[in-house]
Image: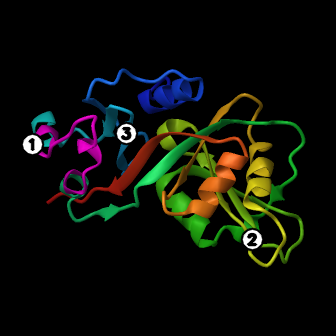
Amino acid sequence: MGGVHPIAQVLSNAAHGEFPDVDGAWERVDPWHEGVEGVVALTGHALIAVADDVADARIDALGANGFGGATNPRLVAGLAGDGWIDALDVVLVANGLGGEPTLVPRSDLRNHPRAEHATAVRTGVATFGYAAADDHTLVTLATGLGGLPELGIEVDPRKGHTGAEVTQAALTLVPREQVVVAACAPGNARALRAALAAGFEPVASVQLWRPHRP
């Protein structure tokens, strides 16, 4: 699959204030990561990334539409089968800050649960943090949603960092003006507030699954 993935294009456009038409429709796109499928929903429009063993008629029969139907739990469970289903997340976008990074590579954090989760659904996962060995603050940077750079962040509660501070530091790992995404559970209000304070803006939702269809 060459070129820019449709989801990357839609999210990049959204980062610049350009959104799909509010038409209530869903559109089918190819999965961007082997073995992972998902739904990205924006206001009144949804993109469903699913392998070609699922017919459009099956997706329609499960109630897909751009007004919430594409993220209905029955649809997601119907497409995932017996496979793993991730939580529904808010998709946030920002621009990289570039410059001199304030974080350093931390290969010792590769076994952190957040890093392991990132490795399961993204490619090229790299782990970063602060230089102090006893600081377990973690930033993952990977090729994620739709092929865009994706950040994951967890702050070591024993240290004095704020979530917004770590998130802004993470943005220095991404080239200036490069669109970067992050996903956050809606109920994780602390993380969501930190992302907003660091300059991220919410544009969509995403739910991922690893299908196992009988």
Q: Residues within 10 Å of mark 3 (few under 14, many from 20)?
A: many
Residue for badge 2: 108
* Spatial CA span between label 3 and label 1: 18 Å
Relative depth, front residue between 55 and 192: 192
In the displayed structure image, the side of residue 181 where residue 154 appears, left or right: right
> Is 96 situated above or below 88?
above
Residue at the location (65% across, 42% down)?
Answer: 200
Residue at the location (10% across, 36% down)?
Answer: 57
- Tell me if I can see residue 33 in this picture: no
In the displayed structure image, the side of residue 198 where residue 184 appears, left or right: left
Relative depth, front residue between 153 and 205: 205
> Is 103 situated above or below 14?
below
Indicate the position of residue 162 as horizontal and vertical percent values.
78, 62
Q: Residues within 10 Å of mark 1 (few under 14, many from 20)?
A: few
Amino acid under disc 3: Ala
Where is the N terminus found, in terms of image quarters?
top left
Residue 137 belongs to magenta span: no
Q: Residues within 10 Å of mark 2 (few under 14, many from 20)?
A: few
Q: Secondary structure at mark 3?
A: strand
Instruction: Answer with mark 1 or mark 2, whichever residue precedes in sequence.
Output: 1
Indicate the position of residue 97 as horizontal and vertical percent values.
79, 36
Q: Secondary structure at mark 2?
A: helix
Residue for badge 1: 61
Amino acid under disc 1: Ala
Q: Secondary structure at mark 1?
A: helix
Amino acid under disc 2: Asp
Residue for badge 3: 41
State the extent of the magenta-drawn residues as a range: 59-75
